[in-house]
Image (cartoon, helix red, strand yellow):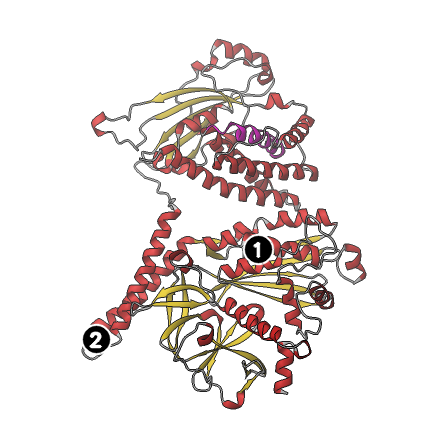
Amino acid sequence: MSDPMEQFKVIFFEECSDLLISLEEGLMQLQAGDSDEEVVHSVFRAVHSIKGGAGAFGFDRLVSFAHIQETLLDDIRSGALEMEPAYIAVLLQAFDILSELVGAAQRGEEVADDLGSDVAKAMKAILDQTGVPMAQKDEPAPASEPEVDTDIAEKNMRLFRISFKPYEELFQRANEPILLIRELGTLGDLTVTLDVSDVPDIEEMEAEHAYFSWDFSLITEYDEAAIREVFEFVEDDCDLQITDHGVYLSPEAFVEDAQAGLFEDIEDEPDVSKTQKAVKAAKPGETVVSQSIRVELDKVDTLVNMVGELVITQAMLREQGGELLVEQYPNLVQGIEDLSRHIRDLQDCVMAIRAQPVKSVFSRMPRLIRELTATLGKKACLVMSGEETEVDKTVTERIGDPLMHMIRNSVDHGLEMPDVRAKAGKNEEGIINLSAFHRGGRIFIEIEDDGAGINKKVVLEKAIANGLVSPDANLSDEEINNLIFMPGFSTAESVTNVSGRGVGMDVVRKNIQSLGGRISIRSVEGKGSKFTMSLPLTLAVMDGMVVDIGPEKYVLPLANIIQTLRPGKEDVNSLPDGRNVMMFRGEYILLVPLYDLYHIENAIENPCEGLVVVVEGDGGVLMGFIVDDLVNQQQVVIKSLESNYALVEGVSGATILGNGRVSLIVDISTIQDMSANQSREFQSALPETNKISPQAQISSEIH
């Protein structure tokens, strides 16, 4: 049986992930000048919650650092310190250290003794400005009897009576009363009374039910809001009443009466109409039900796989049902159609469980912009939209690095220096728009800047100098733009911490392609550039077009298909290397014989006798796939070939069709590269005087 504490640790670290995102967002809001009181409170609560949970599991290093950060934030929210830009810089550094400590605790790793020591000293130096040394801000230990503290005696103290009665389901929500009591004890002098009157006989006792309740007397300098924060995560799982007795004493009276036990004579049932303030009290007999539950990701993945198998079974039934006569079996045929519709709805619901807003990825970008502009001496403003757009969890986990590369590229290579922008009549502060939206069953993420755009002349010269293209290449503007995605390409004059190594944008394209996505560029010199990523909403299921190629059936991603047609003889022309091109919408596109790339015999080779499926590849390049015929359009469950068999070039995965046969899914991007490689191989076999670019081939042969 698994250790319950390990299960709670998993929950704690999941909450830490959300809290760190909230913390960074709040700090960036403060850095942007949003001094709203609620923002400061949310930042404080995030650190406070991380510290409380870390203490429960004995992560002392994490607790110590978080305590200093929490104390600084507490002084800021209480008004003891005025927020200054220098403080934000220190708090952002503290966020980095806190994230590192949380990660180390999660991995069970030891951290260097001096990790974060400089940041901790900086925070203590700020705290010392309040006139109270950090040592005096440490948490007092809980005490059963009030002790005289000369520092506390100089403050106005209040007495609170707190009644805390958990519901039976409290433990099932992964809450622990002892942790709350410890936290409450840090606010002042705490007296605890345990009530066991609701504990049943041992035969009737349920191991996971909470039966104890508590009454507390708390002497503290804090207000009711601070006490309320201690119980903020269990307010829906208990009856909680906080009574403020409003006791104010002079320092002398406090010392004298505390020693004499004055508070023992205060009545247990005060006048509710004058002093009682209930935080939250449920009606008698009413149970407050949580609106969410935590589920392990493995269980969700298992559910997704089971629904995938259900989709395959449904496809088989539908194919078999298509052979039935509607007149003879109307109810059976209708039932199969209803089953198909319900399974589609079920699949959408299951996929929605794994969906997450891209906000978790977008939230890292303001910090990146801030650091880059400080390093490069530029000015930039990030405008984000569509943060709540949802996508599969796997996609959100893997688009973070590509997105950071593209943002870094926009700031470093796209935006000009402030003086250059001013001379060009632009605002000194550049604008980078980051947006996300759904369209056609895919998610689109756009990064647009108002910088200098791509200097096509410089890009082409660099590509020629690096041997990436031949000197006589006649490339279109779009092809020149796409050169920045080639391995080893960089326009940076020198290698810096930001750029210059030529390992950025090619990694971006590879990562996006590995997700079944595409990336395209639109750029206008002097106006700016727009990068558009198109990604599938999920990596488990996709809409596809099943096509015949000889005796085999292949699946083309429906999102890439532009049009299907049968060209006339006058629309098709041949190149010297034996390849064919077709006139489509006023321009020539390359015809790709899939039967040749996949080595399929007995397939239709003449495009005028078969069909041409026009698809969009990387960079918006159009190609025509020669196929025998279209079978149908259907939803297919993607199975990994690499994990179940081996990596096959030109194939992104496999699926099981309704007839039970395995069908391969065409990888559009790889086919595009394979076709380009064939052209380069042909060119390399020609004498030097005969080598021409594909564009030149088309122009010379057609015109």
Q: Is residue 59 left or right of residue 643?
A: right
Q: Is residue 432 above or below residue 578?
A: above
Q: Which mark is residue 330?
A: 2
Quadrant in the picture for the N terminus:
top left
- Is residue 63 within the magenta segment? yes
Q: In front: 60, or 653?
A: 653
Residue 647 x/y as whole percent: 44, 60
The residue positioned 58% from the left and 58% from the top of the image is: 508
Q: Quadrant of residue 632?
A: bottom left
Q: In front: 240, or 199?
A: 199
Residue 654 x/y as whole percent: 39, 64
- Sequence-wise first label, 2 or 1: 2
The residue positioned 33% from the left and 58% from the top of the image is: 307
Q: How many labels sit on residues?
A: 2
The residue positioned 28% from the left and 26% from the top of the image is: 198
Q: Label 2: few (<14), some or many (≥20) within 10 Å?
A: few
Q: Label 1: few (<14), some or many (≥20) within 10 Å?
A: many
Residue 523 x/y as whole percent: 67, 67
Specify whether residue 244 is in view.
no
Q: Quadrant of residue 604?
A: bottom left
Please name which of the two marks, 2 or 1, marks the residue nearer to the observer: 1
- Is residue 540 within the magenta segment? no
Q: Looking at the picture, which amino acid does disc 1 mark?
A: Pro
* Residue that label 1 marks: 402
Q: Which mark is residue 35?
A: none
Please report the bounds of the magenta region as a residue range.
58-77
